Amino acid sequence: MTPWRRPFPPQPLVGRSGAWAALLALACGLGLNGSAQTQRQPHIAYLYPAGGQQGSSFKVKLAGQRLDGVTNVYVTGDGVTASVLEHIKPLNGRQIALARDRMQNIQRALKTTPRAEPTISFRNELDTNRVETLSRAAAQKELEEIRLRLLNPKNRSRENPQLAEDVTLQVQIASNAPPGQRELRLATAAGLSNPLCFRIESLPEFAEQEPNEHRAQASTIAKLPAILNGQIMPGDVDVFRLRIAQPMRLVVVVRARELIPYLADAVPGWFQATVALYDAQGKELAYADDYRFNPDPVLFYEIPYAGDYFLEIKDALYRGREDFVYRVTVGELPFITSLFPVAGQVGQRASVELTGWNLPVERLELDLSQQAPGLLPVTVRNDALVSNPMPFWVETLPSCIEQEPNNTRSSAQAVKPPILISGRINQPGDCDLFQFEGRAGDTLVAEVRARRLNSPLDSILRLTDAAGNLVASNDDHEDKAAGLTTHHADSFLSVRLPADGTYLLHLADAQGQGGPAYTYCLRISPPRPDFELRVVPASVNARAGASATLTVYALRKDGFTNQINLVLKDAPRGFRLSTDRIPAGQNEAKLALLVPMLPLFHPATLRLEGHAIIDGQEIVRPAVPAEDMMQAFAYHHLVPAQELQVAVLPRPRLALQGKGPGLTLPKKARPKG
């Protein structure tokens, strides 16, 4: 039999001796008697900084709760290693009393024991029948640790429980670590924490230095492009001096809500960052508090001449807290503002027109011959800099491009469903009309993708007959798969046609807006039943030989109601599901994930699939890991994660045992059984 190895081997924690750590553990009652499934999951609220440069080593601060016994750090992808340096948790009343008692016992023993004696003896504060012996050096060291802990300002009770505990990490990023977004989790005595966004970048990184609320205090950034990191506290304003050597087309990209999508106890539910650019005399040159419908702002400005400029970052409502974390990329960055067309057919080629700032090309050829249906992120590279990704929708349906003029019934563009149309609302007040033939009793589906393709269009759809009589209409339609969306502005119609004849589909902007960026993809077709899956949570904890509860959500499309069979794909030995299906017509299933009989040294990454029969063919869809996140005290969203990770922990022991001082529970404190 393979010898048992302790999962998540502990890393050294600064300032905690064995006896002092044991005292805290005993006072907390960390006997680990319950199963991991019934314990509340460890939670981290923020990381700062929330990323770093390739080839760098730096400290990361984070805060959270239920982080007792934090040991390891897990980051998805390759090239990143991290270790725990320190964990500080506010002491409760019993812990403070025990610490003071222990301090007094040690001090009394030091005073009453002759100095010639190398050791001291004193009664244990938990069990007065037990005598402890320490060397004088060990006693002095422990006294200092207790004193520092009791005096530590972080020992106070926190106003926000979700920020109650502080952890410091040492992070090392390899020079060849692939850039992009990762996920970071902590491993604790109770298992894995939730994942948080952690970015790997190639640009130099700078951290704000407080105080920096005024231009005279601003940190100087001597060379661009660069990434600026900071935290906004209540009423805080952060100012950076940008030393710009020549005229440039400056782009400022803020990541704030992207790092922490939802705050459960804040309105509107995220850090609403604003950014402003000033010249050396303090004149405001540009300001942004969002980017179209995205809360994270992007600022564009043509710098006319070299000199010092000042960048100001704050919260729109002057709120702030430790979890108001930002990363701002500044420089002459390539940035795509729109694509056209925005959709294409599998197996074809697409010639895409690009609009934006600092782009090396105005047109891009996309080869869709090997592309699967779904979203294709489109980027361009300008020297060493890579642009923001813009989504391009790929479908199996025949595709075409909207042809102007088509804004009246007499000029409506004739199409033959099923079809995928790329179009745009060219100017305010514009309306695009599409004409097709329909038969009585047929079900027609019309679906707009615009906001889900990063377009500012707030679409509205109207279906009329040839005489202009309204058959159906829709403004907004919720897509639960879009977990970062709070205004579901894309339209959707599913209607049974009342008669044979000609029908007109009208597409416009609900706010009467328009312009070159107001692009859309319109599907007109019979129903195409399909589904997506989300599995919650993305971090799962279970005791060896036990189980953990998962919830799998079925996001059904176009009237799909069939049963979905669930399969663990290439799972390590010992993992299996108690329930292997989502019944027909149901939108979710709770199931037990059964785990191996022996604990695992590292978390296991699992993949879950859904299999269903649609029109006589088996369709397979991945179950995307997700976190159920609360926004502003009330609203819940399924926010996708990168991986589904499972920690299999040791079974609880019947009693705490140990050889060092303070590690053995007295009889009255030992768990029964």
Image (cartoon, grey):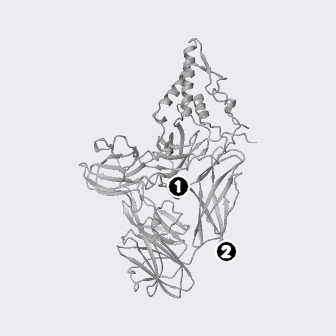
Q: Position of residue 329 (x, y in %)?
A: 39, 51
Residue 616 shows which numbered tag? 2
Q: Position of residue 236 (x, y in %)?
A: 36, 45
Total count of labels: 2
Name the secondary structure under disc 1: strand
Amino acid type, label 1: Met
Task: Name the residue at 57% across, 11% down.
Answer: 116
Residue located beneath label 1 in the image? 629
Query: In this rendering, is residue 282 above or below 20?
Result: below
Q: Position of residue 368 (x, y in %)?
A: 52, 69
Name the image quarter holding the C terminus: top right
Decide if residue 19 is in sight here.
Answer: yes
**Most foreground residue, 153 or 205:** 153
Quadrant in the rendering for residue 426: bottom left
Name the secondary structure under disc 2: loop
Task: Name the residue at 45% across, 34% down.
Answer: 153
The answer for how far apart the CA atoms under marks 2 and 1 are is 37 Å
Decide if residue 173 is in sight here.
Answer: no
Quadrant in the rendering for residue 191: top right
